[in-house]
Amino acid sequence: QKTAYEINDRDWSSDVCSSDLNNNSGHIKCYKTGQFYLLPTFLINGLFTMLLEVLAIFAYFAAAVSAIMSRKTTKVSIWCLLFAGLAMLFQATALSRTIASDQGLAIGLGHTSSLVSLTICLLALISHIRRPINLLLIMLFPICILTVLMSLLLDSPISDFVSMGIFIHIIVSILAYSLMGLAVLQALILAWQNHRLKHPELSPSSLKLPPLQTIEKLLFSTVMTGQILLTASIISGAIYIEDLFAQHLAHKTILSIVSWVVFAILLWGRFARGWRGNTAVKWVLWGFCVLMVAFFGSKFVLEVVFPPSAS
């Protein structure tokens, strides 16, 4: 009895390529007129993943164009949501095929950046449905395109599989960083709004934005949620990471704590002193810069400046 993979010319008029079930050669057989050609499966998988990432880039570009075209309204653009949803689907599928493998986890700079941008985009779209801010999406989609390109071009070293506790720590850390990244975009919009109010003659704009108080309230809600997750990330890291110095994580822990202190001061200043406007923007930017160095600093140095192949 023939399997689904044993199809000859009488059954199909063109080449049929499929995984060979009868051996473990890791190749794909293409049957045609009694002949077959061997193609490595990693090549097929790599090309398919590359195609997904290219499709994600084009979909993000289309979403950005849709957001720009709807910049004069505060309504949700259906086309923007559709293209962004497709882009996120392509990006998530590509990441699921590259991050986890039989050898371990590939969580290098490119894949981690792409995963963070995907999370930020998901959070931004959820927020966009409730409070449409097209400028936020216009700023975000190019960043997503850049991180997908990084995932496409940068090699990610493969590390050993981690325990469930470390896995939870990684997920919480990515959520915390993503929320703080979203807060940075909101802070930049807040700063631009303040500039427009103080200098209306210098910064004419056709962008339709929510009131300043709405953006400010949204910013502090995002920072507070991110601070809770950042606290959970630091605590889970202290519990599940066995040796900070042996795993080269001491600087990440120290900088994450410094960032936590910065955001804690910001929240204290908000509720105790009524901080707002550019003061809040500065503290958000300072805290995120420290967190970005903690999150990506060592990955950039070890994978881009001094890659393993250079040694």
Image: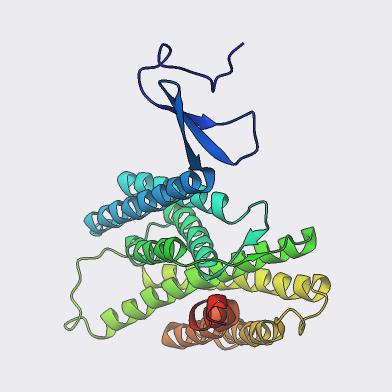
**x then y, percent, for residue 281:** 45, 83
> Relative to 153, is 20 on the left or the right?
right
Tell me if residue 86 comes above or below residue 115 in the rendering: above
Residue at left 67%, top 51%? 102
Quadrant of residue 208 in the image?
bottom left
> Relative to 288, is 213 on the left or the right?
left
- In the rendered view of the protein, which quadrant contains the N terminus? top right
Residue at left 72%, top 66%? 169
Residue at left 48%, top 48%? 43
**x then y, percent, for residue 42:** 53, 48
- In the rendered view of the protein, which quadrant contains the C terminus? bottom right
Residue in the foreground of this view, choosing between 200 and 39:
39
Residue at left 42%, top 69%? 215
**x then y, percent, for residue 262:** 60, 87
Residue in the foreground of this view, choosing between 256 and 189:
256
Q: Is residue 133 visible?
A: yes
**x then y, percent, for residue 19:** 55, 33
Tell me if residue 89 comes above or below residue 149 in the rendering: above
Tell me if residue 52 comes above or below residue 206 in the rendering: above
Give the colouring mode of the picture: rainbow
> Relative to 53, is 177 on the left or the right?
right
Tell me if residue 72 comes above or below residue 308 in the rendering: above
Q: Is residue 84 visible?
A: no
What is the tally of numbered marks visible in this picture?
A: 0
Quadrant of residue 163 in the image?
bottom right
